[in-house]
Amino acid sequence: MKRRETPFTPAKFTFDLMQNESLRSRFVGIVVSIVLVVFLSFVYFNYELFEQNFNNRVYWFSGIFLLIFLGFRGFLVSYFVKVVYKKRQSIPRAMQFFNVFFEISIPSAVIVLFALQVTPYNSLLSPLTQIYFIMIVLTIMEMDMAVSTFAGILSGVEFFFISIYFASRHEPPRELALIGTNMYYFGRSMLMVATGVIAGYLAERIKKNAINFYSQQEEMRKIELLFGQQLSPQIARRLLESTSLSRPEKHEACIMFLDIRDFTRITENMSPEQIISFQNHIFSDMFRIVNNHNGVVNQVMGDGFMATFGAPVNSDKACAEAVNCGLALLQNLKEVKNDHDFPETKVGIGMHFGSVVTGNIGTEERRQFSITGQTVIIASRIEQLNKVLGTQLLISENVQRQLNGDGFRFSEYGKHEIKGLSQPISIFSLL
């Protein structure tokens, strides 16, 4: 037998359902309170008419007591729902159906009590019957089609049998003979059932949209955890819209490696607190600049980092974004030196463009997003050439080709051997 899978329900959505249930019960209390105020006001301003029709005050007081009980119960349930949620982290469906049963059946009992005292048609056609529709509509907040449909069917069945019972024992007024027919009450009952079904359908639609929204929020949270603080909001949105991180994917990307020169010498006389402060100031600005240029900081070392442009989200301007980012990083270092009492800091930046593979590596308990391929290795070794050539930013011939026509000016440093490659490659810097 195939096991039925339980639909994914985000925790935040479950919490909001509890809030909805609490608010719905409070609305029930408010609605019933308004009905009571209006009803008692009517009695006050039409007291003689009231005395003529309500000879047996037992029915009157019983009906008023039930309405007061229903209103008080609404406010009580509003509080009690939160207590139940704290203990169980969910709202039992049985409790939802039980609440609806009470909220529908008590108005039915009040209609019966008043119909036993006054002409039944006054009770059956009174505004009290509109409470059914209000209670049905409020079940939309449950976001459960079964609950709303149950409310509609229960309202229709109770109203139909109450109506048939009294209509069979009392003749309707001559001018309103139609209200004595079974079809009239059957039609009103079916309207209640239809209202419940429609309310349930709307509730399901709202529920589906809400779950999709919360699922996207949950996915965004997972992505942010996966990348830490190094993911720009633009990249995060594009990731959610375009691709899955769970499978390996091939991209054409520009890889940047940045290394702080002489980091050990710069920090040898600093206290641990000063080193942390130095790194925070340097890297926080650098990460912001990478994010602003649609890059992703993929790996962070103690004295540098690796950033990717065009992966895990494809970009037609990956090289231009990477080079502009590198230039902005160098400019930012000058501003940091001027604005803070930090030692003069130089960096080496190397870039290479080519094919990379992205994907998660690890187990369900621990995963790490990784970007691998020969392009990554070459970019790292181009960064190391800065030490040999006395430069701060070097790019490969592949990057230079991608930038042709973008208005950049280059200085060529000739061909250089790169460990792992059979042929030397041309290296460029920017003027």
Image (cartoon, grey):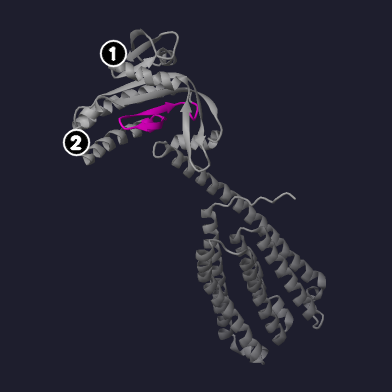
Name the residue type under label 1. Leu
Q: Nearer the viewer, residue 90 or 290?
A: 90
Q: Position of residue 170 (x, y in %)?
A: 79, 83
The residue shown at (43%, 26%) is: 309
Assess whether residue 62 is covered by the magenta stretch: no
Q: Position of residue 373 (x, y in %)?
A: 48, 22
Name the quadrant of the C terminus. Answer: top left
Give the CA distance from mark 2 to mark 1.
29 Å
Q: Magenta region: which residues?
A: 290-314
Q: Nearer the viewer, residue 218 or 208?
A: 218
- Other residues around mark 2 within 10 Å, as few (<14) / some (14–19) / many (≥20): few
Q: Is residue 343 left or right of residue 16?
A: left
In terms of secondary structure, where does tag 2 sit?
loop
The residue shown at (47%, 31%) is: 370
The residue shown at (34%, 20%) is: 383
Residue 191 vs 362, above or below: the answer is: below
Q: Position of residue 376 (x, y in %)?
A: 43, 22
Closer to us: mark 2 or mark 1?
2
Q: Nearer the viewer, residue 51 or 324?
A: 324
In terms of secondary structure, where does tag 1 sit?
helix
Q: Is residue 392 left or right of residue 127?
A: left
Q: Which residue is mark 1?
A: 389
Residue 122 vs 10, above or below: the answer is: below
Residue 134 in view, yes or no: no
Residue 181 in view, yes or no: yes
Q: Position of residue 141 (x, y in %)?
A: 58, 60
Q: Which residue is mark 2?
A: 270
Name the residue type under label 2. Met
Residue 201 vs 83, above or below: the answer is: above
Q: Quadrant of residue 415?
A: top left
The residue shown at (64%, 70%) is: 98
